[in-house]
Image (spheres, rainbow, N blue to C red):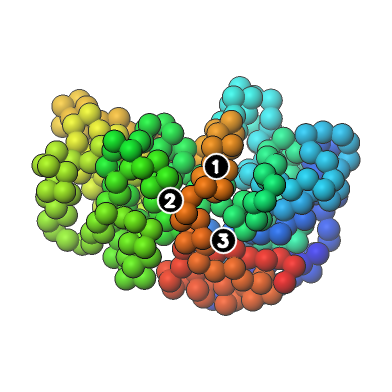
Amino acid sequence: MKKAVILGERQAGIAEVPDPHPKEDWVVVKVHAAPMCTEYKGYMSGGKSEFLGHEAAGEVVAVAQPGKVKEGDRVVVMPQYPCGTCHLCVDGDYIHCENAYDFTAFTGASEGRATMAQYLLKPSWILPKIPDGVLYEHAGLACCALGPSFGAFQTMGLSAYDTVLITGIGPVGFGAVVNARFRGARVIAVESVPWRVDWVKQMGAAEVLNPSDPEIVQKIKDLTDGIGVDCALDCSGTVQAERLCIDAARRKGKVAYVGECGQDLPLRVSPDLIRKGLTIIGNWHYNLSDFPGIMTVIQESPLIDLLVSHVIPMSEIHRAFEISSSHQNSKMILKPWE
């Protein structure tokens, strides 16, 4: 099979590798749509990688034993290789599993774990079926494009009564706007890249503010009758944005973080948490039982087509990474068979 690889700084290509084979309840999926996420960072820095991607949509083409799916089923490929038996997996919070499989040890091979490839290998129980009529390109949005913010908004209980602040309008941030607008919430977005500012306005953000504005907190309060936002969600993974979410939230408000960050957040327990009464959560993905809900967003939101800015043949992986690195895009989808 063919798969995409990063060869060096701003160098990407296609490699020929062995096809994966099914084993026990793990099945082979033919990938029809492979969404791109943060892999461009490795492309820009020169971080070589032979196993790219963690989200996909495709068709089951080989099984080793009867199980949750059969050959011909159209499925969304969930991330990770969770055990399937611990309490977190059983409860649907598989993303937090602490007993994940060692892929190579279990399969006896290394190929099949990349999603930017023509085939992949996954446990059948984390392959929810795609409803009839949903395009593969749209079904793939059920992972990182919509998943993190969907799970966060579920936990926060975001509704049409709320104003939500969304910081960091990249592919995940655009997905957050789609989810928030579907729930009827008013969106205040924070972004500085002109292309993203224009795109998020098309998605219906009520206001778009520049993160470098020294008066940004006051402006947010002015937009909320001096109170602050009901909910805030950071998708950027920057300390500045994380802190803004806390400062801009109203008393008894809710703040969620989905953007990965390696730096320390200056958090003051008394004024930020106790006196202000904030609820702060971290969210990685969504509970598997909420898959029908996220599919409803995909099927019914009028903004779904705006969430996908590019569909590109995997054979043009270098061009795809160049676009992704430019930040002139929302979610990008690779087509492994083109």
Mark 3, other Cα within 10 Å: few <14 / some 14–19 / many ≥20:
many
Q: Residue at x 29, y 36 (%)?
A: 161
Q: Earlier in the sequence, mark 1 or mark 3?
A: 3
| Residue 335 image offset from top left, x and y in percent | 67, 66
The N terminus, quarter of image: bottom right
Identify residue type, mark 3. Answer: Met
Q: Earlier in the sequence, mark 2 or mark 3?
A: 3
Q: Identify the residue under disc 1.
A: 296
Question: Are dots 2 and 1 in contact, CB under 8 Å?
Answer: no
Q: What element carries label 3?
A: loop
Residue 111 placement: quadrant: bottom right
Between 322 and 175, which is closer to the camera in this rendering? 175
Q: Identify the residue under disc 3.
A: 36
Q: Identify the residue under disc 2.
A: 178
Mark 2, other Cα within 10 Å: few <14 / some 14–19 / many ≥20:
many
Question: Are dots 1 and 3 in contact, CB under 8 Å?
Answer: no
Q: Is mark 2 on a helix, strand or loop?
A: helix
Q: Taking 234 as reference, is 203 above or below it?
A: below
Q: Which residue is drawn at 57% across and 72% down?
A: 320
| Residue 50 image offset from top left, x and y in percent | 67, 63
Identify residue type, mark 1. Answer: Thr
The C terminus, quarter of image: bottom right
Query: Which numbered mark, 2 or 3, is in the foreground of this view?
Result: 2
Residue 287 placement: quadrant: top right
Q: Taking 137 as reference, is 286 above or below it?
A: above
Identify residue type, mark 2. Answer: Val
Q: Is mark 1 on a helix, strand or loop?
A: helix
| Residue 164 image offset from top left, x and y in percent | 29, 44
